[in-house]
Image (spheres, rainbow, N blue to C red):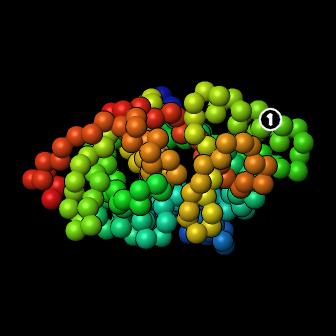
Amino acid sequence: MTVTDSRFVRNGQKQPRSLGLELCGGTSIAYFQIHVQAQRQESSMATQIVMDHTGDTRHYFDAKDAQTLAKAEERFKELTRDGFTAAVRTAAGEVSRVRSFDPTAEETLFFPRLVGG
Amino acid sequence: MVFLFGRYPVEARSLIRVLRRLSRIFSSRDNSEARSQRLLRTWLTPEQRAQFDAKRYFDVIGCDSRKRYRIYYGTATNVHEIDVAGRPRVGWCFVPDGYLAAGDIMLAQKISLETNEVGALLIANRFPIELSRRY
């Protein structure tokens, strides 16, 4: 979730259609507005998710923008060259490996090469 | 602090309390383990997700042999091959290289078994399962 704005609201006045965290009672309510719209914008773009020590790093790109598309393709090639496996999934949750860059894939996941434990 | 908040000690303490709570909330929601679990859950099938929520493990079917594997919550020795009676036969240990959180490791194991079972098992180390531990 992306926190894009925060503000103090007195006497419990909240913005509609937003998620909030009430942190203390009384008249002072710390209220963090989380813009769902911003997240929707992100999700409308294609995403490359790279597993790392932070959990994952996400790279968003617009498949209609030639410049960001080329950058995403270059990232795909670089990661797979380094031994990462690329995978995509269907709406039903089935996963498949991909060996070449697919500009139509909404979400591509990369994980490092496997080693015996 | 006394100099800064001397005139408004109550408000200052309240503000500090709020900031501390905020810090705790966001650090617990956004650490690597929490992020990896969120990612794992979005990539599981609805059946796997329900199983994982209920039992902290989920089953996958190997793409080549159609055998069933059970992936437990964990970072090592957490993949068990299951026989037709639902009993563990043998353990397989393979993980993605580097330091990753448990959710990421489990997701990499799931994808590997579902898309390249033979390749994953060639890399993996076999280990016997102690029945008393999980069964």
- Of residues B127 and B42, the one drawn nearer to the viewer in this rendering: B127
Task: Report whether residue A57 is seen.
Answer: yes
Residue B80 percent across, percent down from the top left: 28, 51
Q: Is residue A96 above or below residue A65?
A: below
Above or below — where is A84 with respect to B64? above
**Residue B11 visible in the picture:** no
For badge 1, the amino acid type reads Lys
* Front-most of residues B20 and A116: A116
Residue at image position (40%, 35%) is B123
In the displayed orientation, state which residue is furthest to the front. Answer: B65
Residue A25 % position (x, y): 43, 64
Name the quarter where the C terminus of chain A is drawn: top left
Viewer-closest of B99 and A76:
A76
Label 1 secondary element: helix
Left or right: A36 with respect to B11? right
**Number of other residues with Cα within 10 Å of mark 1, as a class: few under 14, some 14 to 19, many 20 or more:** few
Q: Residue at x 32, y 57 (%)?
A: B70
Total numbered badges shown on the rendered structure: 1
Q: Which residue is drawn at 36% across and 32% down?
A: A116
Q: Could you say where residue A106 lies in the image, as x and y percent from the top left?
A: 71, 55
Residue B97, located in which quarter of the rendered image? top left
Identity of the residue furthest to the left in this view: B132
Tag 1 subunit: A
The x, y position of residue B67, in whole percent, is 36, 59
Question: From the viewer's perspective, is A44 left or right of B76?
Answer: right
Look at mark 1 in the image and give the residue it sits on.
A71
Left or right, A5 with respect to A71, comes to left
